[in-house]
Image: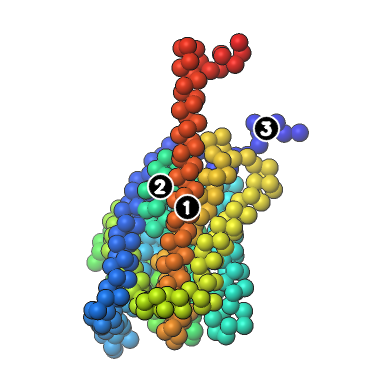
Amino acid sequence: MRSPRSRPTLFARGSWPEARRITALLRTETAGGVLLIIAAAGGLIWANTPWSGAYDALRDFQLGPSALHLDLSLATWAADGLLAVFFFVVGLELKREFVAGDLRDPRRAALPVVAAVGGMIGPAAIFLAFNLGNGDAVQGWAIPTATDIAFALAVLAVVSSHLPTALRTFLLTLAVVDDLLAVTIIAIFYTDELQLPYLGLALLPLAAFAVAVQRGVRSVWVLVPLALLTWWLVHESGVHATVAGVLLGFTVPVLTTRSGNGDPSAQDPGLAEWFEHRIRPLSAGVAVPIFAFFAAGVTVGGLDGMVDSLTDRVTLGIVVGLVAGKALGILVTTFATAKLTRAELDADLSWVDVVGVALLGGIGFTVSLLIGELAFADQPRWEDHVRIGVLVGTLVAAFLATVVLRLRNRVYRRIAEEETRDDDHDGVPDIYQQGS
């Protein structure tokens, strides 16, 4: 029979290098999350002013060479082009986590992967429950399944700066896996017409890009043309162009072997770190905020318009899916993993902490809005309701997470103060007082 000390631990502390890397990464994503919120608020406010026509004209302004089928609106350029940069970073981060991070251990990787799957099944099931029999509305089943890591980390930074690194790492990894699953869903379920010749041709510049980065090539004159050609061919194939970003990210080496023994500790950083330092600020500070500015701009239409939107089954499915479906999916799968593996929470954590992080998982924005545009491209009314549903669901999830994590902070602070008073009593440590 196992002793309690030998039982596996959920959310155990990671290595110091990984904790330091996660801390630096969170600072960048948090700053990007603040910019995302500002940009989304700007688009929403402008779309509901007397100058909303100017906003619509800007969003629909077409730009690009028609000969290459790239005469796209600025909103489409933001969704297809700029978000490819975001998903390139997602590809880099996912590969890094499973190659060089603490999550290269399958036992550690299992929890966030399983939680991400549960966090997608829950909201999808709720959306379908609201919209079965509602015609083509079922096409939006994947809208509430995605977590916006930048938005979630911005909220986390405000309300709980002392949350243990292990839970922050869990949230980050869950969101990255979530994004990968979302891209897979987009590629499989939201591709209307697949042009195999273009998709086959895309493998050529992709392979050339992979060879170049594996050999340590850093020249923008080599890598950028290959990346753009891959992006254009994927775009022409009918698969959403953001998939190209993930594929390109996967090709970048995370480590370069120094001793040849395969031990990550005996290897040097590969090009992934070099790319991240240069492209992550562009993704978090430019690409995602611009997409949010164009995607969040929905004309509500006053109180009547808001009531009409919030009583629509599409909107309700998204809101309840993000708030309840995400949290329940993450919590149930995490609890089930703990029971099946007989694991215990780390001594510094409680299930309240896990509830707070699970609620943060319901902050869906960037990818949710993207899937909404793809699902209801020919349904303007539902497309507007998607934006309202994502905004409301995100805000409610953020509010509930804020309440839970602030209460958690208050309780932990009170316990710490009581322990300090007990330890200082008569100058005798509490551990010795108990034995007297």
Is label 1 in a helix, a strand or a loop?
A: helix
- Pick the residue in front: 238 or 211: 238
Residue beneath the point at 47% across and 46% down: 405
Kindly indicate whether the residue at mark 2 contacts the one at mark 1 (C-beta within 8 angstroms).
yes
**What amino acid does circle 1 point to?**
Ala
How far separated are the C-alphas under marks 1 and 2?
9 Å
User: Tag 2: Cα neighbours inside 10 Å, few (<14), some, or many (≥20)?
Assistant: some
In the displayed structure, 18 sits above or below 368; it is: above
Is label 2 in a helix, a strand or a loop?
A: helix
User: Tag 3: Cα neighbours inside 10 Å, few (<14), some, or many (≥20)?
Assistant: few
- Pick the residue in front: 12 or 158: 158
**What amino acid does circle 3 point to?**
Pro
Quadrant (top left/top right/bottom left/bottom right) for the C terminus: top right
Name the spot of residue 201 as percent of width and height, x first: 42, 79
Name the spot of residue 151 as percent of width and height, x first: 39, 58
Quadrant (top left/top right/bottom left/bottom right) for the N terminus: top right
- Give the mark nearer the N terminus: 1 vs 3: 3
Name the spot of residue 335 as percent of width and height, x first: 64, 49
**Residue that extends furthest to the front in the rendered view of this protein:** 303
In the displayed structure, 286 sits above or below 408; it is: below
- Give the mark nearer the N terminus: 2 vs 3: 3
What label sits on residue 4 in the rendered view?
3
Q: Does residue 21 appear left or right of residue 279 in this picture? A: right
Which residue is disc 2 drawn over? 159
What label sits on residue 37 in the rendered view?
none
Name the spot of residue 92 as percent of width and height, x first: 40, 58
Does any portion of residue 179 appear in the rendered image?
Answer: no
In front: label 2 or label 3: 2
Q: Does residue 225 appear left or right of residue 180 in this picture? A: left
In front: label 1 or label 3: 1
